Amino acid sequence: MIDFLKFSKSKDWALLRSSYVQEVEELMPYFNTAVDEMENSSVMLIPLDYRYSLALKIMLSHVRNLRASNWKECADLYEEQLHRWTMESNSAEALQIQQEISSIRELRQKVQKLRLYFQVLIFS
């Protein structure tokens, strides 16, 4: 693999580009073979939105634990889990914002008290 960091701005970028193009051309047959194998495999039965490891692990777990007996139930349970995670994340974020607002209010009150204190000192 080409290490882009080894080339400084003063180096010949055309050389870098030609090396990159050569490497891509060398790897292209492997890529095409992998794509062909994938298109002929059972992976194509799985919708694109669920073709990543987390989705597949969770859905397989639903089948193993008898929570789902068909694809629709697996997908529905997975979507519910994603929704739950999103809600939890949003709740945690909202809580953090509320805590920050509370801290800001406390600081504002302290600043107001200090201003009053200094005004009393200056005008007394």
Image (cartoon, grey):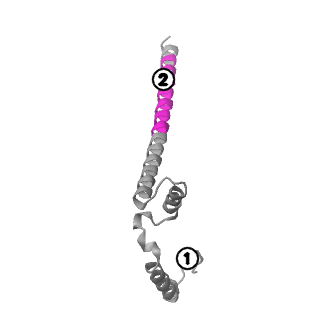
| Residue 48 image point, x, y percent | 40, 67
Q: Is residue 97 magenta?
A: yes
23, above or below 52, in the image: below
32, above or below 67, in the image: below
| Residue 10 image point, x, y percent | 53, 79
29, above or below 70, in the image: below
- Could you say which is closer to the camera, residue 23 or residue 117? 23
Residue type pointed to by label 2: Gln
| Residue 30 image point, x, y percent | 52, 85
- Furthest residue toward top: 124
Q: Is residue 113 magenta?
A: yes
Horizontal side, residue 114 vs residue 49: left or right: right
Picture residue at 58% right of the left edge, 74% below the top: 5
- Could you say which is closer to the camera, residue 80 or residue 23? 80
The residue to which callout 1 is attached is 4
Picture residue at 49% right of the left edge, 82% below the top: 34
Label 2, residues with CA under 10 Å away: few <14, some 14-19, many ≥20 = few
Task: Write down the region rendered in magenta.
Answer: 94-117
Picture residue at 47% right of the left edge, 28% below the top: 105
| Residue 96 image point, x, y percent | 49, 38
Label 1, residues with CA under 10 Å away: few <14, some 14-19, many ≥20 = few
Residue 27 tag number:
none
80, above or below 37, in the image: above
Assign the magenta stretch its main secondary structure.
Answer: helix
Residue 39 placement: quadrant: bottom left
Q: CA–CA distance between discs 1 and 2?
A: 53 Å
Who comes first in sequence, dot 1 or dot 2? Answer: 1
Asked if the residue under mark 2 is in contact with the one under mark 1, i.e. CB atoms within 8 Å, the reply is: no
Residue type pointed to by label 1: Phe
Residue 109 tag number:
2
